[in-house]
Every structure is written in C-alpha cells, then in structure tokens.
Image (spheres, grey):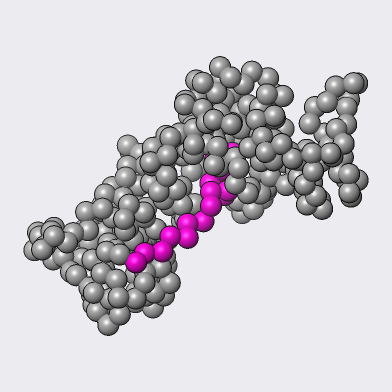
Amino acid sequence: MKPFHSLLQMIDTLHTEEDFREYLEDMRWHGEPVCPHCGSISKYHYKLTQKGEFKGLYKCKDCRERFTVRIGTMFEDSNLPLKKWFYAIFLFLSHKKGISSCQLARDIHVTQKTAWFMLHCIRHNIKDDDATFDDMTQMDETYMGGKSRSHGNGTQGRSLKEKTPIFGMVSDGLVYAQVVPNVQKTTLYPIIKERVRKGSTIITDELNVYNALGKDYEHKTIPHKQHIYALNGFHTNSIEGFWSHIKRGISGIKGIYHLASKKHLSKYCKEFVFRYNTRKQTDGERFNDFLQSFTERLYYGELLMKPEWAWESN
C-alpha cells in the first residue's frame, strides 16, 4: 500500500475504525494474519463475526486461540480508537522537533496524561539504533537539563549535579547518541570501540578524554578553545548541528519539551536520533515503516515510580 503524502490525505482516505483496522492489518500482515499466540501465518484463519458482522476478531486454525491485529502490539487493551493512535503517531513522527503532550491532547481530544502516555508508547517502540561507522566520524558530548546557565563556576556548563551528559557520533549522514553517566574514558571508549571500526578517522574537540584515541584511530583535533572550528578540511559541525537540533526540541523556554527528566532523557534522545536518521524519508514512508515494525505493549506502571507526568511539561 502506498504511503500517505500527508496527514490530510490519511484523514480523507480512512473514515471508519474498520478502515484504520484494515490498514493496520495490511501493514503488519500483508494479507496473511499472524497468530500472536503460536506464530501461525495463514490467510485461512477463521474470521469470527458478531451479529453477522466481522470486526477483526480471528480464531487461529492451529492453536484455536482468538486474536486481533492489536494483540501483542502497543495498541493491545487500549480503549482509544486506532484513529487517535494513527493521528498521534503521524504527528509525532513528522514534526521535526516533536509534539508536546499538551498539544497532542488538544489535537485528538484526550487528557494530557493520556497524551503523555501515548507519546511514551511511541518512543518505547522506536527501534534501537544499531549504527556503526567505518569512515570519518565526528564525536562530541553535550549536557542537558539543569536550571543554571552560568559558567562562572569553572564547569563550562558541565556540572553533573545539574546536567546529564549525552555522547554522540555522526558519520555519512547518520547519527548515534547515548545518554551516559559521565564523559570519562572508561565510559566513552567501549562505546567508540563497539561502534567505530578500528583505523577510521575520528574528529573531536580538544577534550582531554579523547587524547588516547590515536592508538587505534586516525585522530584529528579541532581546537575550539582557540576559536578554530575547521582545520585542514576537518570539523565537528555535523554533530554540533545535531546538538543544536535536539536542544531546540528540549528547552526550558522555547522548546517543544520544556523539561525532560533524567529518567526519560534517553527516550527523548532516541526520538531525535530516529527523526534525524530518517529525514530523507517522506512522512508517509516513516509512518508505514513504524506500523510494520515490531511493537510491544508498554504498561503505565513501567513509566512511573512517581507521577512525573504532573510536573513534566512536555
């Protein structure tokens, strides 16, 4: 099935809950329903009717268990119609800087608490990035969170008491970013060795932790402290551009997400990585790929040990 060009086209094409259910079946099953209980794939599973009408309930021809296309997915046991889920997913994936739970709640007429949970369900089901690099790779770190903007304490805005570090790499248009406990060698080097082929060219700023990279890689250093941002054709502009993008999304005043707690920051980070790495896809292609990928339920209790949704303004 061809992807939608826009949200408006989806609205014009899918009118009823059955339309949305059939579209999801087509995306996930491609004409052959899959039993989530035993894994049987067959177009001959029994279609069960209610008052003579089929509404998506199947009975497996092998294990005899009943199932729908929602079972075993992020939509299982949700009281929300697929229409609202589809709208939320399309908006989330297509908005470059994301969409706040307050805005989504208004757009699809649910509570902010429900919208917040829906957005986290979508984030939870974004595929983990498995990017590896074997070319020129830019590396850098940034710090998110904290109330103080002052650098007068000698930390250059890097105090771990207030901020959470994120380590990132970019090469050939693909980015990888990970929330880390610190930017020490023992933390960063295992990530680098796992993701970057030995012998590749690595470009960093002059942070001391990168000094030992020259043993396994061709290490190029850009002396930012001297206000030099490109040297002999090498620079870290791409990874810094990604940091700028993610900080425009998560910002106390101007961002879409006004606050992302340390507990959930890695999920927001994965969200921005996903959009960056799929930026060459159309919104419809990205939407279809998400529906076709494996998804799983996320329980509300897994998200919260305290009701953070009440104070996390996103």
Q: Is residue 97 left or right of residue 120?
A: left
The residue at 27%/82% (across/down) is: 215
Residue 5 locus on image (x, y percent): 47, 26
Residue 124 located within the stretch drawn in magenta: yes
Q: Is residue 204 left or right of residue 57?
A: left
Closest to the observer, 86 or 186:
86
Q: Is residue 146 above or below residue 81?
A: below
Residue 212 locus on image (x, y percent): 26, 80
Can the viewer see residue 289 in this picture? yes
Closest to the observer, 33 or 308:
33
The residue at 36%/55% (across/down) is: 175
Q: Is residue 42 above or below residue 171?
A: above
Q: Is residue 69 above or below residue 228?
A: above
* Number of marks present in the image shown: 0
- Provide the residue span drawn in magenta: 118-134
The residue at 86%/44% (across/down) is: 60
Residue 139 located within the stretch drawn in magenta: no
Quadrant where the image shows the N terminus? top right
Residue 209 locus on image (x, y percent): 27, 75
Residue 158 locus on image (x, y percent): 29, 62
The residue at 25%/69% (across/down) is: 201
Can the viewer see residue 308 in this picture? no
